[in-house]
Amino acid sequence: MSRIEFNNVWKEYGRHVVLENLSLSVDTGEFCTIVGASGCGKTTFLRMLLGEERPSRGEIQLDGKPLRDEPGPDRGVVFQRYSVFPHLTVLQNVMLGLELEAAPLSGRLFGAARRRASEQAREMLDSVGLNQALDRYPTELSGGMQQRLALAQTLVMKPRILLLDEPFGALDPGIRTDMHKLVLQLWQQIGLTVFMITHDLYEAFYLGSRLLVFDKLRIDPQAMEAYGATITYDLPLANVDQGTIEGIRQHVEEEVPRAVEAAVN
Amino acid sequence: MKRLLNLHPRRVSRTLLGMLPFVLLLLAYMVTSDARLAENPNDKLLPSFSSIGAAIERMAFEPSKRSGDFLLWADTGASLQRLALGVGISAAIALVFGVLLGIIPYINAGLSPFVSAISMIPPMAILPILFIVFGLGEVSKVVLVVIGITPFIIRDLQQRVSELPSEQIIKAQTLGGSTWQLIIRVVLPQVLPRLIDAVRLSLGAAWLFLIAAEAIAATEGLGYRIFLVRRYLAMDVILPYVIWITFLAFLTDLALRYISRRAFPWFQKQTADST
C-alpha cells in the first residue's frame, strides 16, 4: 500500500553534505526508529519526508509517485515542542484538522457537522486519555498531556505516515513509559507507518519494528562537512525475535487500558 | 541587613510609595504657586487651585459665549473621534499587512523594504503635504495619525507572525490547512492580542500626532484648545487639559488591557507562563 522509497537521496547545503547516497524502502505498517549522533541528518531526513525540505539529488517516492514537496494531510507529525495550538482548547485542537478538511473557506464547522466532528474528536481524545481536559488550553496541560494532545490531533486525520521528532525527549521517564504504551497501542490499532527519531536507544529498540542508525561512513578531519551521513545499520527488529514482539503485544494489551485509566484519574 | 535589591515593599507601603511622587509634585506646585502669587497676584504661570477650578467650571460646565458649546466636551469629542478613526484605520491596515508580510514570503520580499523605508519618514515632515492634499479638514488629521503609527504596528505584527514556531505552521499544513485557512485559523487569532498590545504602545505617538495636527489647523479639539489659549498664557486652562488628556490616555490603555484579558484568556496564560 503506502510504500516509501528513497532512491540514492543526497542533501547538500552548498558545500555542506548532510546526507549522502541514502537508499531505503519502507513498507506500510513498519515502525522505524531512527537513532544517530547529533548533526547526522536525522532531522533533515524527517523534514524531507515531511516535504519541508527536498532532496538535492535522488528521489523520494510514495507508492511509486514522487513525494509532494510540501507538508500535507497524508503525513502527520508530532514535534518535541510547539505541536499544538495555544489559542485553541484541547477539543478545538483536535477538531481543527476535521474543520479545515470540511470547510475550505471558513475553516469552521457549524451545526450538525460541528457536532459530528466534535464527537469524532472526543473519541480520539478518549483513546489518548484526555477526555477530562476537553476545555483546557494547552498551557494548562503538563508536557505529557500536551504530547498526547499532539498525537490525538494528528491521528484524528488518519494519516498514512506518522512522523515523530523526539516526541518524548522532554518528558519525565515515568510519563515516557506511559507514552510508549500509548504509541504502540495506537500504532497497532490504526496500522500506519511510523518514523520516529529518538536519542534513547532503549526506546528505539522497544518501540520499533525496524531500527535505522544514521552515521557518517567517511570522515575528513580537515573538512568535517565534506562527507554526509547515511544509514549505516538497518536492523529488522521484528524479525530478530518474534517472541519479543509477541511479548510486547501482550504487555501492551494488558497494560495500556490500565495506563489510560490511570492517566484519566 | 539584607541587600537593597532583596527588600520588597508590602502591599500597603507599595501603594503609598506609588502615590508619593504625585503628592510631592502637588505640594511643590502649591508652594511655588503660592510664593509667586504672593509676589504678584496677577501671575499667570502657576495659577492657584481656585483659579484652575474656575477655569474647569467655565470650560466644562458653562456654555461658551461664542458658540454655546460646552468647550471641554466638544473638544474631547472631536479629538477622541479623530483618534479613534486614526487608530482604528491603522490597526486594520496593519493587521492585514503585518500578517501577509509575516506569512507569505513573496509579499514579504516585495513589500518589506518599502514598509521599512516608509517607517523612516518623520510623519510631521509630511504634515504640510497632507494639508495641501487633503485640505485643513478632518481627513488630514486622521491621515497624519494613520501615517504616524501604521508602519510601527505593521512591523511589530510582522515580527510577531514570524515568531510563531515553524512547528505550528508545518503542523497546520499536515492537518490539511491551506494558506488562507492557516491565516484565519492559526495566525490571525494568535496575532489579535499582539495587535492590541501594539496599539497600546502606539497610543502615545497617536496622541502626539493628533495634538500636533490640531495645533496647526483645527477649529476644535483638545490640542487646538491648548495651543489657542497659550496666546493668553492661560495656564489655568492648559494644565487641566493636559491632565484630562493624560487621564483619557490612561483610560484607553486600561480598556484595551481589559478587552485583551477578556477576549484572549489563553494569551494571558501563555505570557504568564513564559515570564
Image (cartoon, rainbow, N blue to C red):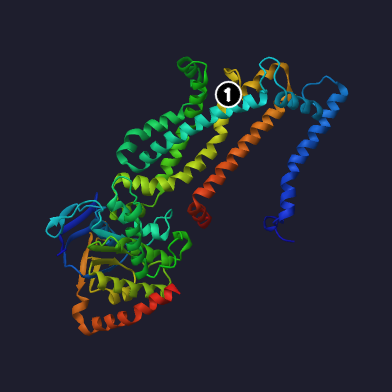
Q: Residue at x 44, y 35 (%)?
A: B92
> Residue B63, percent across and down?
70, 21
> Residue B263, percent across and down?
50, 48
Q: Chain for mark 1?
A: B
Q: Residue at x 37, y 33 (%)?
A: B113
| Residue B46 shows up from this direction | no
Q: Is residue A241 above or below residue B57?
A: below
Quarter location, residue A25 = bottom left
Quarter location, residue B10 = bottom right
| Count of numbered labels shown in the rendering | 1
| Residue B90 shows up from this direction | yes
Side (left or right) of A47 relative to B65: left
Residue at the left extreme, as displayed = A64
Side (left or right) of B203 relative to B191: right
Q: Is residue B217 above or below residue A235?
A: above
Q: Nearer the viewer, residue A103 or B26?
A: A103
Q: Nearer the viewer, residue A44 or B68?
A: B68
Residue at the right extreme, as displayed = B38
Q: Is residue A136 above or below residue A175?
A: above
Position of the N terminus of chain A, as image quadrant, is bottom left
At label 1, the amino acid type is Ala
> Residue A152, percent across and down?
34, 64
Side (left or right) of B43 relative to A208: right
Q: Nearer the viewer, residue B123 or A126?
A: A126
Position of the C terminus of chain A, as image quadrant, is bottom left
Q: Secondary structure at mark 1?
A: helix
Kindly identify which residue carries mark 1. Answer: B212
Side (left or right) of A86 relative to A214: right
Q: Nearer the viewer, residue A246 or A220?
A: A246
Neighbour class for label 1 at 10 Å: few (<14), some, many (≥20)? some
